[in-house]
Image (cartoon, rainbow, N blue to C red):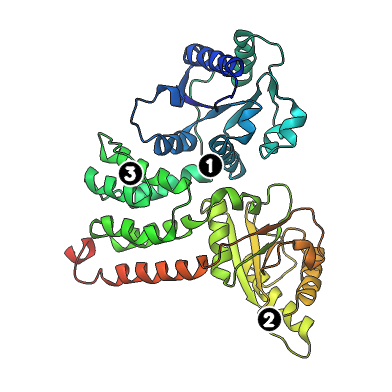
Amino acid sequence: MAITFISHSSAKTEEDQANADSVRTELIKRLPDLGWDVRVDDLLPPGTDWRSVLYGWLADCDAAVVLVSKDGLESTWLKREVHILLWRRAVGSRLTIVPVLLKGLSPRELRRSELSQLADLQCVLQDETEPADLVSLIVERLGDLGGCADNSAMRAMTTKIEHCLDEVTDRFTLRSMAHRLGSEGDWRFPTASEERRHVAHQVLAPVPTQKVPSAVNEVEFFLALDRLNKLISLLLPTWIDPLGVRLLLPGERRVVATLAGARAETAEQHIHRASCFSGAYWVKAVDLVAGEAQHEEHMTACLTAICALLKSDDENELPIEGEVLFLVIDPAGTELGVVGHLVRTLIGRFSWLNIIVLTDRTDPADLGVPTAGAVHIPVQPGAEGQMARTRRALKEIRDRRSGHGKDAES
């Protein structure tokens, strides 16, 4: 069956809460008759690790009905759920999202809120419509679906993590790994396959980088070295909050961004995190070196990287169909005005090129580039240092594989 997730939040007044409850109850009653398997937190038993379950539902659902009230605009969890759903759509999911504006909330108020991107979808308005009639409108939007397959990058990413852990068959080991990554409570699954999926769903939320080595330690003995390496690569960027980097996904526009980091690897990890490690995204980095013919030297370095991105000796070629190409520029002390001139030259010549400049400036407009598609990605102080420490710890885990573990058995 296709899965529908109902996203909602509490209302402050009894009248608004009763209205929201009526709509939700009617959805739970009617959707199964149309082939939908309904997931909503009302159905969770007491004591459930609800955060882990919700992340699983958000990753797996084929459709989502988002019930938004005026009070819901301020709900932290509703905002997180909506951003994860929009992230899935941005990386290629065929997920259907039906925003429902409950009584008292206008489209104008939605557009002025942190959930404004929902207004870009076709919203269902309640106004004075009774809950039963409102649900009829929602059902009409969802349609009669017997099942659908999501081939999005997010689903592919969680599947890759599950595949890396395929050799781990002990449920208790997998459960320990999930706890290391942030799973709370005592949620238990009857099969190792379900435990692996539970582990994979933990990375939909930010995972503090210092947690990753201990999580990998739980399973490294059971993994062949190639799977261990792939698992580490998939887990390294999970310290980045995906909700903050979704704007790096170009969609129908190019991206020109500043990122408050000092290392090209940080930018690469942000792109990997935003794209869910989609194989369509390619990154090359350039260090700018000052010289007498500064602009010419910088341009030559960038063109060399662009040719590498294009997999061609001719920079005038177009990207291979389906590929999304990023150039990361490290100013390396070059004045921002000089960098801005270089960026303007590049975006004027290569309409398909996405650019990230490593700088602590909070406004990409400081580069003097057009503001459309321009974003700034902050990085917490000390985050790069902690990430480097984590990388060293994971390297030691790899190196320790000599003489024990699955590879040593052959």
Circle nearer the N terminus (1, 3): 1
Which amino acid type is marked by label 1? Ser
Image quadrant where residue 221 sits: bottom left
State the separation of the CA atoms marked 1 and 3. Answer: 19 Å
Front position in the image: 281 or 197: 197
Tell me residue 56's x, y (percent). 43, 37
Q: Position of residue 255 (x, y in %)?
A: 71, 56
State which mark lies toward you, 2 or 3. 2
**Residue at which label 1 appears:** 152
Is 359 situated above or below 10?
A: below
Residue designated by label 3: 196
Image coordinates of residue 333 in percent, x first then y, are 68, 81
Q: Give the mark nearer the N terminus: 2 vs 1.
A: 1
Q: What label sits on residue 333 in the rendered view?
A: 2
Q: Amino acid at mark 3?
A: Arg
Residue 72 visible in rendering: yes
Whether residue 1 is visible, yes or no, is: no
